[in-house]
Amino acid sequence: GFTNWSKRDFQQFIKANEKFGRDDIESIAREVEGKTPEEVNQYSSVFWERCNELQDIERIMAQIERGEARIQRRISIKKALDAKMSRYRAPFHQLRIQYGTNKGKNYTEEEDRFLVCMLHKLGFDKENVYDELRQAVRQAPQFRFDWFIKSRTAM
């Protein structure tokens, strides 16, 4: 067994697996405080070998798989966004957004276009991208008098 691993270390390990996926050992190792990458790597291989011996493995696996599904969803959204943007030479002006028939529109097409383009420019998968997006909206000259969009919060 791993006598130098506490319950807290185990929980950090599980959370990191959920956040980064089971294959990103490097990121998992950075997330588990007080453990070297070698220790985390060793623990990880034993964990995945013997995880079925744990009592609440269903709950743990569901947690990790939910996180991995979120990662896959982010990747597919990023690919779709990259593909959409690459179709235009000047997406800030040319991008057309298809709206469903019964969707209530909160933003104008110009605002939507700006939000989508800036999200792509700043990096969709960046940690604090929505705070940066909010700053970009506040600094954009075209929204100088648009109180509605300037008053939106990041989350």
Image (tube, helix red, strand yellow):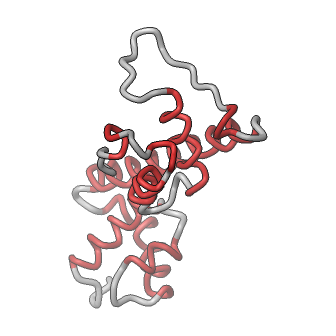
Front residue (pair 56, 76)? 76
Instruction: Identify which residue is drawn at 62% across, 41% down.
Output: 81
Measured as percent of width and height from the top left, residue 5 is found at 28, 84
Relative placement, left or right, of 11 versus 146 is left
Measured as percent of width and height from the top left, residue 12 is found at 30, 73
| Relative vertical location of residue 3 with respect to residue 135 in this rendering, above or below | below
Instruction: Identify which residue is drawn at 26% across, 51% down.
Output: 59
Residue reaching furthest front? 145
Instruction: Identify which residue is drawn at 27% across, 88% down.
Output: 3
| Relative vertical location of residue 106 with respect to residue 139 in this rendering, above or below | above
| Quarter of the N terminus within the rendering | bottom left
Measured as percent of width and height from the top left, residue 63 is found at 32, 52
Measured as percent of width and height from the top left, residue 9 is found at 28, 79
Instruction: Identify which residue is drawn at 44% across, 87% down.
Output: 39
| Relative vertical location of residue 18 with respect to residue 43 in this rendering, above or below | above
Residue reaching furthest top? 101
Relative placement, left or right, of 133 versus 116 is left
Front residue (pair 123, 132)? 132
